[in-house]
Amino acid sequence: MRATRILHDLGQSVWLDNISRDLLDGGMLEHYIREFSVTGLTSNPTIFERALKNGSTYDFAIAREVMNGKSEEECFFALALEDLTRAADLFRPIFERTNGVDGWVSLEVSPLLARDPVRTSIAAKDLFCRAARPNLMIKIPGTRECLPAIEEAIFFGVPINVTLLFSREHYLAAANAFLRGIERRIETGLRADIHSVASVFVSRWDNAVAGKVPKNLKNRLGLSMAKRIYEAARSLLTSPRFQRAYNFGASPQRLLWASTGTKDRRAQTTMYVSQLAAPFTVNTMPEDTLNALAQSTQVYQPLVNSDDCEIVLAAFLAAGIDLDALAAQLQDEGVNSFVNSWNELISVLKCKTAVVNKNPPLQAAS
């Protein structure tokens, strides 16, 4: 049995952290669903930037949008929604079978809005309504400024994937924003079953301290922070506050392990996946990690006890790593990284738009 199926049977959702029109047109996404037990998909500006830049798959679609007078940003969201609604339709049977627990795809609001809660909230509602798919989540960064946008979007009924969470404090702030939105729905007599995931970025911790800590701590910070967050999530789900919301029909916000591709070339490709096999969580992974996992038949033990994480984190503190400051730094860097990818994406679209304006393709014109 493939390790992807083993994780699925354990109770962890395996999602793909990638999207492209080639992946859809070539049938590879359907293959992953059928053969690798993939039950969801995530995307971000970096993924779309690579997909648009590398090749001509989108050229006719871009030409169509340009000839309809769309700006580069409008063009991007039109293309992204086309891809993600197709993906959502592929995952729809899983969504229906699991009563909305699984079968999700995600689309991110513009990274330029990461510090603007009002515009983020408006954008989240608009994109969700335009998609017209119940199993499409809108990604909102878990920055301090956007916490009100998360609450407002949940209250409006938009499923949210909270991104760029690094620490227990980041997670709890996002989880509280989610719960406030749910509690407001309960108070006004609305349905409380709005789904959400909280995306915890793992490998970036280890990249940040590479070469700065003793060898016995190498590649252990990301996993230890993830385990600390897992304990916080378990405590929250058993709290009187959530149990009250659950009695009104609320769905738990699941943890999603993101950035689980191994950046250290000397480490095992599935290092983060193998140690975060936690039931009732999601692991979204790049294609190379997914394929490596699918070739493995390793039997993973469920993550049920993470007591050792605090010992490891204390060792990092003793080595001079300020975990709170580094968490804030990583979140800021994450925002900036997505902004840079967004700007590159818009630049690619501008270049392709210039070509279209000079030589409109006949297929696009028709």
Image (cartoon, helix red, strand yellow):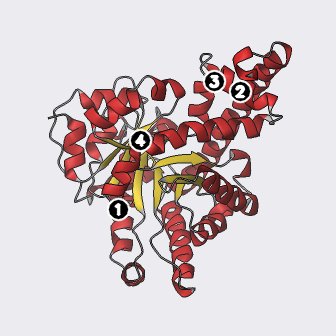
Q: Quadrant of the N terminus?
A: top left
The numbered mark, 1 or 3, whose residue comes first in the sequence reads: 3
Q: Which mark is residue 62?
A: 2
The numbered mark, 4 or 3, whose residue comes first in the sequence reads: 3
Q: Is residue 41 visible?
A: no
Give the spatial CA distance, label 2 vs label 3: 6 Å
Q: Amino acid at mark 3?
A: Tyr
Mark 2: few, some, or many residues within 10 Å (few <14, many ≥20)?
many
Q: Circle 4 sits on which residue?
A: 90
Give the spatial CA distance, label 4 vs label 2: 24 Å
The numbered mark, 1 or 4, whose residue comes first in the sequence reads: 4
Q: Is residue 199 visible?
A: yes
Residue 266 versus residue 74: which sits nearer the camera? 74
Give the spatial CA distance, label 4 vs label 3: 20 Å
At 34% from the left edge and 64% from the top edge, which residue is drawn? 231
Q: Is residue 266 above or below residue 93?
A: above
At 39% from the left edge and 84% from the top edge, which residue is drawn? 244
Residue 116: percent from the left, percent from the top? 74, 58
Q: Circle 1 sits on which residue?
A: 99
Give the spatial CA distance, label 2 vs label 1: 36 Å
Residue 361: percent from the left, percent from the top? 74, 15
Give the spatial CA distance, label 1 vs label 4: 16 Å
